[in-house]
C-alpha cells in the first residue's frame, strides 16, 4: 500500500469534509462514499453528499453535503473483500 505523507481529516460544520491520504474511491452516491486511505478503509454516510474535489495523485478529497457519520474498518478495501492475510496465517488454517 502506497503511503502518503499524512492522513488528515477535517469536517466543517458537518457540511464539508476534507481528507488527505486518499488512495482509491470505491463507490459514491448521495448517501454513502467508500474510500481506501493510507489509514485503512473509510465509509462516509450522509445526505446530499457530492465529491467536489478529488486528486488521487495528491491523495486529496473534498465532500460537500450533510455528513451523518464516518467509519474506519481494518482489513477491508473498497472492493468489499478482506485484505489478503499473511502467508503464515493462510498456511496454518
Image: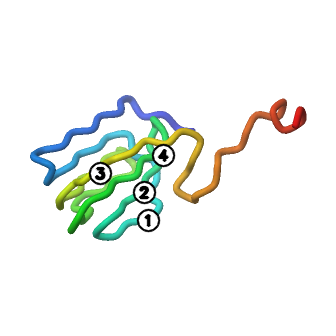
Q: Residue at x 21, y 68 (%)?
A: 48
10 Å crowding of disc 1: few (<14), some (14-19), many (20+) = few
10 Å crowding of disc 4: few (<14), some (14-19), many (20+) = many
- Mark 2 to mark 3: distance in Å? 12 Å
- Mark 2 to mark 4: distance in Å? 7 Å
Left or right of residue 47, residue 58 in this image: right
Quadrant location of the N terminus in the rendered image: top right
Q: How is the structure coloured here?
A: rainbow
Quadrant location of the C terminus in the rendered image: top right
Residue that mark 4 sits on: 41
* SS of the residue under disc 2: strand
Q: Are marks 1 and 2 in contact (CB under 8 Å)?
A: yes
Residue that mark 2 sits on: 34
Left or right of residue 7, residue 84 in this image: right
Nearest to viewer (mark 1 / mark 3): 1
Q: Position of residue 89 (x, y in %)?
A: 81, 33
Residue that mark 3 sits on: 61
Amino acid at each position: 500500500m502506497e503511503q502518503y505523507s499524512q492522513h488528515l481529516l477535517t469536517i466543517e460544520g458537518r457540511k464539508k469534509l476534507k481528507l488527505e491520504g486518499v488512495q482509491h474511491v470505491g463507490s459514491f452516491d448521495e448517501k454513502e462514499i467508500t474510500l481506501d486511505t493510507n489509514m485503512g478503509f473509510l465509509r462516509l454516510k450522509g445526505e446530499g453528499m457530492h465529491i467536489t474535489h478529488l486528486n488521487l495523485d495528491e491523495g486529496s478529497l473534498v465532500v460537500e453535503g450533510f455528513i451523518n457519520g464516518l467509519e474506519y474498518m481494518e482489513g477491508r478495501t473498497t472492493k468489499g473483500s478482506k485484505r489478503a492475510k499473511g502467508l503464515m496465517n493462510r498456511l496454518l488454517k
